[in-house]
Amino acid sequence: MMDDRNEGDRPEPVELTAAEREALDALPREREPGRLLEERTVRTLRDEGLLASRPGRRVESASDSRMSTRRPWWRSAAAIAAGIALFAGGLSVGQVLGARQTADALQTVFVGRDARLASEVQRTGSDYVAALAALSEVDFQQPADSGQALEVALTALWAAANEIVRLAPDDPLTARILQGFEARARESNDRGPGGQLLVEF
Amino acid sequence: MRAQAVVPTSDRILAERIVGARDESAFRELYRRHTPRLHQFVLRIMGGDEPEAEDVVQDTWIRASRNLGDFRWESKFETWLTGIGLNLCRNRLRSSGRWTDLPELSLAAGQVEHREDRVDLERAISLLPAGFRAVLVLHDIEGFKHTEIAEQLGVTEGTSKSQLWSARRAMRRMLNPAGSEQGDVT
């Protein structure tokens, strides 16, 4: 316990010493929070009606629904989550067969423009995984090269997770993925001016 | 061909777009401009608790967005935002019993942890009682004047000054637990 009885024994300066001032000045003034926070905040503001719903979202016609003119966010999120699950499932049974099954299944979940976009995600996701598989076969001569390859692969994954979180900010799996990236970035102190992972291509 | 300088849109214009058109991109721009500083400030006031700091930052933006139309632009937007964040920190700390109102806070009351080991500056700040910490962060790190701190915390200017002195003293003791001369800061 701290005791003030000896307060007068040793006079202390009221003002900061030069060394103290310098140390306080050297403390960081800024710190990037997780990317998830921005999406959580935007989502809450949209729910409160303080921000407009995201432009480009499909608006249902009156014949689609008499109750609502806009597709509820949870329906879009659920559809996309279903698409992602189908994508993952497709990969697990084999890329070629899985891709076809997934593409077929996507048609039943999504319609119109949504279906094209979801198919695009599925197709490019398969391309990404195929490229990773090829990369993993490379016999790197230098450890630095394999490290660079890993960073390239992770950066694409990180960028994808950053977009997925916009679709479903409350999704716990995406949150954990992003938190993992953020912890990694903090550990390695490998952050750019915008607080993002930096990879030299 | 001469490159054109990109002039960032002012806070006020972005705020008007948020209030008038509920413009998400304007909000995101304003958010990204001010959040890193707000987050660091809130994190320090909350004693380094990252998840709690993020909750406070989110609540700060929600409250700010609700009241954006009433903001009169007589102070800097950043200062206003910091004030909201500080209030939310105090509410949260008070509701969990971690905030003692400044006039009742004293070094003699056993409210400053005595440590045998030397800690670094950031850690020392996080170990201060929340009231001391708030005054020290506002004055010595954020550069607020005592009149502003007094207004923000609802105390007199004299209380702010005396609590700053106590906060610095507590911080020095944590940085130099053996009682060596002050100024040796890491």
Image (cartoon, helix red, strand yellow):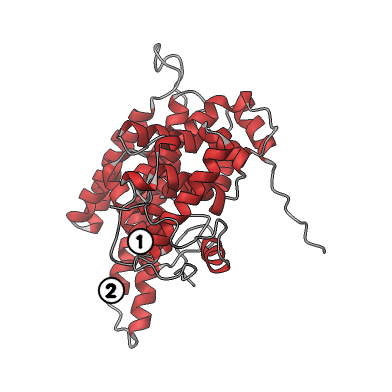
Which image quadrant is residue B145 in? Answer: top right
Counting from the top left corner in percent of width and height, residue A39 is at 43, 40
Counting from the top left corner in percent of width and height, residue A58 is at 46, 29
Question: Which chain contains the residue that carries disc 2?
Answer: A
Picture layout, residue B5 above or below residue B110: below
Which mark is first along the chain, 1 or 2? 1
Picture layout, residue B34 above or below residue B20: below
Picture layout, residue A8 above or below residue B54: below
In percent of the image, x 27 and y 39: which residue is there? A82
Q: What numbered label is drawn on residue A128?
A: 1
* Residue assigned mark 2: A136
In the picture as drawn, the residue positioned furthest to the bottom comes out as A141
- Distance from Cα at disc 2 to Cα at disc 1: 12 Å
* Most foreground residue, A161 or B122: B122
Q: Residues within 10 Å of mark 1 (few under 14, many from 20)?
A: some
Picture layout, residue A62 above or below residue B107: above
Query: Mark 2: which secondary structure?
Result: helix
Q: Is residue B147 left or right of residue A112?
A: right
Counting from the top left corner in percent of width and height, residue A112 is at 42, 34
Question: Which chain contains the residue that carries disc 1?
Answer: A
User: What's the residue type where badge 2 is placed?
Assistant: Ser
User: What's the residue type where badge 1 is placed?
Assistant: Tyr
Counting from the top left corner in percent of width and height, residue A144 is at 37, 82
Which image quadrant is residue B24 in? Answer: top right
Query: Mark 1: which secondary structure?
Result: helix
